[in-house]
Amino acid sequence: MEVKYKTIVIDIPWPVPTLSESVGQRMKTPLSKGLPYSTMTKDEILNFPIEDYADKDCMLFMWTVQSMLLFSLDVVKSWGFKFHLLMTWNKIRGINHLGFFRNAEFVIVAYRGRYGVRMDRKNIPVVFTEMRGKHSEKPQKFYSMIEKVTDGPRIDIFARKIRHGWSTFGDDPNLKQQPLESFIVE
């Protein structure tokens, strides 16, 4: 039986332009060999088989960056989800780029079918603060917040690590080329 998920977190490997080595040093990410993961083209993103994962009633939490924000909204719509709101992660530290201190990352919250955030539980702030970790690593605070108000089963797509209680699929070398079922951690 194919598992369908009520809650999906996805951190798409966006086709962002390569940053300079000096910016990489400030981010503590060596960029001389490019990003530490493969990126996807816009067509690959639009054609990602979200139907293989999404239940008919599903909450989608899609991580995105400034340069891909408008395209991200197109992706959400093309996948059959309704935009609900935008969350902002204040990463405290960031980089100065073209006159702006970029210390935030964004999560598009969308849904299809029945809205799946339980409103009888603690509210989720739309702006949350946690110190950034390694490149592309998402804050545990985010996962803790949404676990309290969403239903399972849950999956973290393009994850950087395995999370207890979540199915995980990703491009990290430790996760790559293993059957999805092997990542379900009860």
Image: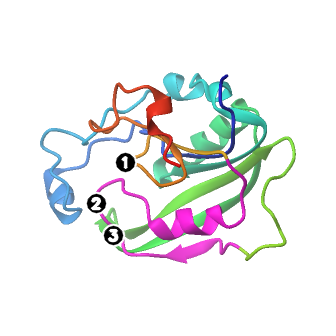
* Residue receiving disc 3: 94
Instruction: Tell me what residue is drawn at x 65 percent, y 60 percent.
Output: 86
Q: Give the CA separation, mark 1 to mark 2.
A: 10 Å
Span shown in magenta:
124-152
- From the viewer's perspective, tell me whether residue 142 is left or right of residue 163: right
Q: Give the numbered dot on residue 134.
A: 2
Q: Quadrant of residue 40?
A: top left
What's under tag 1, amino acid-wise?
Arg
Could you say which quadrant of the image residue 133 lies in?
bottom left
Which quadrant is home to the N terminus?
top right
User: Which residue: 20% across, 55% down?
Assistant: 29
Asked if the stretch drawn in magenta spans residue 89, the answer is: no
* Residue 148 picture location, percent across and down: 67, 67
Determine which residue is flagged by label 1. Answer: 160
Residue 131 within the magenta-colored segment of the rendering: yes
x, y percent for residue 33: 14, 38
| Disc nearer the start of the sequence (1/2) | 2
Residue visible at 28% across and 60% down in the picture: 134
In percent of width and height, residue 149 lies at 72, 64
Cβ atoms at labels 1 and 2 below 8 Å apart: yes
For mark 1, give the secondary structure. Answer: loop
Mark 2 falls on what kind of element?
loop
